[in-house]
Amino acid sequence: MFSITVRDHIMIAHSLRGEVFGPAQRLHGATFLVDATFRRPELDADSIVVDIGLATRELGGVVGELTYRNLDEEPDLAGINTSTEVLAKIIADRLADRVHAGALGEGARGLATVQVTLHESHVAWASYERAL
Amino acid sequence: MFSITVRDHIMIAHSLRGEVFGPAQRLHGATFLVDATFRRPELDADSIVVDIGLATRELGGVVGELTYRNLDEEPDLAGINTSTEVLAKIIADRLADRVHAGALGEGARGLATVQVTLHESHVAWASYERAL
Amino acid sequence: MFSITVRDHIMIAHSLRGEVFGPAQRLHGATFLVDATFRRPELDADSIVVDIGLATRELGGVVGELTYRNLDEEPDLAGINTSTEVLAKIIADRLADRVHAGALGEGARGLATVQVTLHESHVAWASYERAL
Amino acid sequence: MFSITVRDHIMIAHSLRGEVFGPAQRLHGATFLVDATFRRPELDADSIVVDIGLATRELGGVVGELTYRNLDEEPDLAGINTSTEVLAKIIADRLADRVHAGALGEGARGLATVQVTLHESHVAWASYERAL
Amino acid sequence: MFSITVRDHIMIAHSLRGEVFGPAQRLHGATFLVDATFRRPELDADSIVVDIGLATRELGGVVGELTYRNLDEEPDLAGINTSTEVLAKIIADRLADRVHAGALGEGARGLATVQVTLHESHVAWASYERAL
Amino acid sequence: MFSITVRDHIMIAHSLRGEVFGPAQRLHGATFLVDATFRRPELDADSIVVDIGLATRELGGVVGELTYRNLDEEPDLAGINTSTEVLAKIIADRLADRVHAGALGEGARGLATVQVTLHESHVAWASYERAL
């Protein structure tokens, strides 16, 4: 199995709902390092997993919709508890949509999975992987 | 599949038995960065893998039983060759016990696996993953 | 010259005032890794720069006053533009106050400087150093 | 499942063929951090995945055949488009050959897989995993 | 003293002249992580060291003149032995020129120094600092 | 001012004397990442700070005298409280001796300072710098 990963980041404000979140129920914020990993069993005709330039551009597009915002007030996220795990899934799903729409190139249609890892600090991170 | 990871560390002395360990047969020591990763296919009712506060606290409890010690003289580890791989398993097993005892919350009973990675330097690390 | 550094982190929301900040004028947030470095020309009677346990505890106290908050609404920070550079100075000044109050031990009165570095992402960080 | 990973690096020149590579079609270069991960379901008689000393030495041997070279002119790589993914596979395959030849010790014959990850920068890396 | 640092990277081919360079006399290559640090004793009117957006853009401009190239064939570098130290100086000097030309904003004229650090691997890096 | 840094590591056991060290008074251990930084105002005739190959070799020699040992039983360290700060000084002093003995080459006689940083974990490190 082959994979490539590209990294970007977002800087957001949000609050979390549920006693389990303790002080994170208050409005606070985070820098999330965002790692997007694409996997496939065999390389494409160019000997790559996916065009790393397109992968970087499309990841940039997805994170550009989130960064420098208060997620509590984003219409797209209304009613969603934006835990790190949930944000990883949102970013992975949006990347999957872009793959299916052809934005990562025709070769990307052969991708097997996408995984998104969000590092919220040097001591905690979360991840979500799904099929493509 | 979702995961979250929390990091802690231990600073221990020990020696290893077996010619394969070369100079590490002498009494020496290590800082191990300890990454505990919890995985499950679906999030719990709070939209998380596990309460990160409880996960951090329980990992702290497990590493607190090991750190600042000479493992060669720990009664709990008598007769055990404390290679990095074995220490990863010991920590994972102790975390599993705490999950099963309910220390990571009721939601944690839905966890699928726990993985422990021990970084012994910037150029070497070991990992162990088991079902919960 | 000797130094020791301890690391902690904060997760905060804030907005910045001034066109120079571009999209960061909106309410957003950040995880700041906080590195506090203490320097002195000679070690103290215990052969250390400062008690690393006390340094960690006091840094934890200072960052605990800031983390999981919206800095725009903190009375202590009213009227302050909380750029990364300014936050580094605030944390350094508060650590200096604790050194002068004896919270880092009597030996810490021999410290020459304190420096605080705030990492806002994997591609940007800021620092402030002052005399003690 | 257990794993151990050892890290080394190479510094090479090369060019890539195909429009998808954009400016990387020009002769340029890269430092690749090379992480080799060995996995097996159970530890060997020495309580390890593989002798870390031998793993380090053999990885050093494999990267020593590549580093400080212009890969465009290496006879062994003639006609090969040396993308990061392809280089990961080449290194993994060469490590597999050494495992099969006994260079990592008799215990290494019980290894299940080898994975090689090549970090080309702080924002991009690629990986290849294969059975042994 | 305040500072801010921004990070970018270049991927270049080159060879080095002189027996001291050993195998690096052959045509090879490197990824250099490029950290540019700007220092000044007092913040500007916006409470910053320098506009981090402009600093990032101008650093991107400077590294864009070098990346994805064979430095042995760059007319600008003819006759120059492009050691890591020398490349750090070239990048710092080019950033200084941009500061003096006003490309980092009027406030940047108050900067005291610029330092450039080039990481060539996880085990080696070089740095150059100069006045502005 | 120019600098180059090379990294190695040691894995040692030791205990510390003095109440200030708390649980570290027990026999325990550490991996120390060891960064040796050499500085000089102007480059030598080869356009470098110091031969990075020799610097790596000599740092390896110095750390080879310490690693995989119980420092409490090393005759060379009898009566010395081996805090991280003190170990940084010991390594820096031994490197300085090697510079003065010519082991880093004739050009190294122009070095201004050597600094040694010891990382004991992901959240703590210490440093010592001295003239050459």
Image: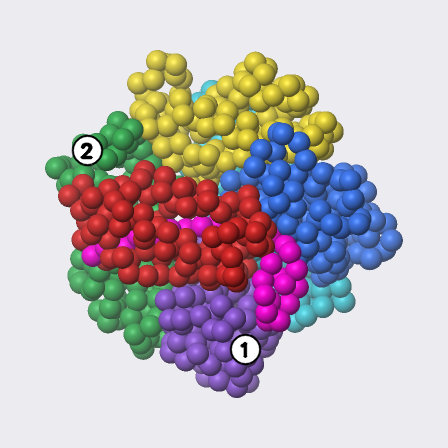
Chain colours: A cyan, B blue, C purple, D yellow, E green, F red
Assess whether residue F16 is covered by the magenta stretch.
yes
Local crowd size for mark 1, using a 10 Å CA cut-off: few (<14), some (14–19), many (≥20): many
In the image, what residue type sits under mark 2?
Arg
Tell me if B56 is positioned left or right of B99 in this view: left
Q: Does the rendering let one see residue C130?
A: yes
Which residue is denoted by mark 2 in the rendering? E17
Which residue type does callout 1 highlight?
A: Leu
- Foreground residue, E47 or B15? B15
* Residue in front for this viewpoint, F36 or B24: B24
Q: Position of residue C89 (x, y in %)?
A: 43, 75
Q: Which residue is mark 1?
A: C104
Label 1 to label 2, Cα distance in Å?
52 Å
Image quadrant assignment for residue E115 = bottom left
Q: Residue at x 26, y 27 (%)?
A: E26
Magenta region, residue range? F15-41
Q: Nearer the viewer, residue B38 or B16?
A: B16
- Residue A32 in sight: no
Q: Position of residue A54 (x, y in %)?
A: 45, 37
| Label 2 neighbour load within 10 Å: few <14, some 14-19, many 20+ | some
Query: Taking E132 as reference, is C18 left or right?
Result: right
Residue D111 lies, with reference to residue F107, above or below; the image says above
Q: Residue furthest right?
A: B101
Q: Secondary structure at mark 1?
A: loop
Image spot of residue C36 (x, y percent): 48, 68
Kindly indicate the quadrant of the structure image that contains residue D96.
top right
In magenta segment, residue D33: no
The label shown at residue C48 is none
- If the image is split into quadrants, where does the C terminus of chain F sit? bottom left
Q: Which residue is located at x 44 percent, y 70 percent?
A: C43
On the same chain, marks 1 and 2? The answer is no
